[in-house]
Amino acid sequence: MSTPDRTLDPALDPGSPVPADGATPAPRGRRILAHAALEARTLLTNGEQLMVALALPAMVLVGLRLLPVGRIDGAAPIDTAIAATLATALVSTAFTSQAIQTGFDRRNGVLRWVATTPLGRDGYLAGKILATLLVHVLQVLVLGTVALVMGWRPGIGGLLAAVPVWALGTIAFGALGLLLAGRLRTEGVLAASNLVFVLFVVAGIAVPVTRYPRFLGGIVDLLPSGALGELLRACLAHGPFSIGSVVVLLAWAVGGTAAVVRWFRWTDA
Amino acid sequence: MGAAMEDHSPALVAESLAVSFGEVRALDGLQLTARRGAVTALLGPNGAGKTTAISCATGLLRPGGGSVRVLGADPWRASPEHRARVGVMIQDGGLTSGATALQLLRYGAAMHAHPLDVDEIAEYLGITGPDGFARTLVRRLSGGQRQRLGLALAIIGRPELVFLDEPTAGMDPAIRRRVRTLVRGLARKGTAVVLTTHLMEDVVGLADEVHVIARGRTVASGTVEEVIASHRDRAGAQSLSARIDAVDPARRDALEDDLRAAAERHGARLRITAGGAADLEAVLLDLMAQAEPEQETTR
């Protein structure tokens, strides 16, 4: 036994906290909720993230309402505008914000530390998904309110039909965002997620597949952005419904999730 | 005391632990134990394998060979219940940068059923108070402030075993002393504390046992005194430490001369040091040199 330093006696320092035996984790639901709250709060109190989550889609809404871009025959301009705006909002949160935040968490060692806590990696991901959904709800409320002011009058059937599309899109784009964050260096994540976001918005979300030349349209048709744009326009702007778009979005969701499980790296090493 | 004090099995046992990163052998047959109610220090130079050993013990890394048991379980397959019993402070943070210090502390507490009082631990470590940083975003904290927050998060769940990877790096002397007191208090109440450090003054008087690691192997183990006393240099010679108190300054030189003469009479060399930390550091440096491959040491 070495001789402990007597001046380190905790009795001399009554403020020293004392651990107790029988450490147990909080219930799983509470752990996930705590993580979702932290993620959502972090996202909503960050100016850049708010810009991407709300300001940018709002600009898309106003732009598409006023400019003759992305319209389809027989649909009111506000309907095509809100369909493209909600798709933009979904991609901004599920893909871009998620990729950037997770990329920084990976670089800062947060993913390493989290894996040693009762939350664990699965709890981290579950909390992240929940936070994304919470932010989505907020986006729909804010952007929907702006659209209502601008004359949007949605039908309940279309809104209900958009929910499964929204959920499938969240899985597909969320998986792609995590894949980016789990493979590239942080600087690469930052650059790629913003660049790919713009490409997604242009390729099938703001500009429908039908507006592209035949060859390019064939490519856009196979992108998750093309499929999401077409499906939301079918639900909210009386656009044509294509089962092919469902298959494409489903394939990106399943393939993306499998790729994350296979290739996501939790550390920078 | 509770169950943790009555359980006499070691909190951590690592046997012949081996980890390779490509061609590099990070751990090469490492042996470690850590007792409950004791502070165990892992010493060694950068790249010796200390952090890799902790990564294996906390389930972050799967060893390629050997075994590691933490509180009787395999950390690689640890359940949330197991992880609640083990606190971890990793090197270089691991803290979410977009939250404030207090938000993160409350978040850490929410992971546990019976956490420490957040206000109490925050006040103790100076996270709140006159020079506190509770409402500062983590990305704006200094290195020492991050260390304090990381330490608070590691112990917030009242763990039975806590790993602290360089807990006092970047801290000012007053806070470092407080942290040392806290660590001693944790051990006294039954927690097994495993820490790594490059500061010998963090070891002497604080650690009950030390493991010296070099090139992925344990090259010396025991109490600080045992490691110093049992150390033999390359020629096989040992060191003998003594402390002489109540020296009259006027007779100090004469005493030194006498001691030198006595050492010479017995064929030994006298080295007057500042105390235990310097002795341990000298031993550590010598052990590091001895662990180097022969061709490098003879160059």
Image (cartoon, rainbow, N blue to C red):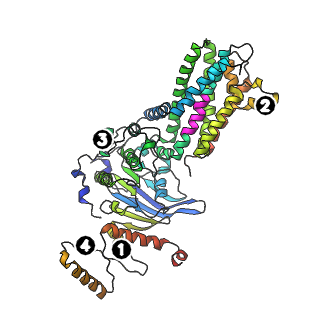
Q: Identify the amino acid type marked 1.
A: Ser
- Which of marks 4 and 3 precedes in the sequence? 3
> Which residue is pictured at 65% across the width and 23% down the height?
A84
Q: Residues within 10 Å of mark 4 (few under 14, many from 20)?
A: few
Residue A23: x %, y % from top left: 36, 43
Q: Which residue is mark 2?
A: A216
Magenta stretch: residue A94 in it?
A: yes
Residue B66: x %, y % from top left: 51, 60
SS label for mark 4: loop
Camera-side residue of A227 and A60 = A60
2 and 1 marks on the same chain:
no
Q: Identify the amino acid type marked 2.
A: Leu
1 and 3 marks on the same chain:
yes
Label for residue B230?
Answer: 1
Q: Is residue A249 visible?
A: no
Query: Of tags 2 and 4, which is closer to the observer?
Result: 2
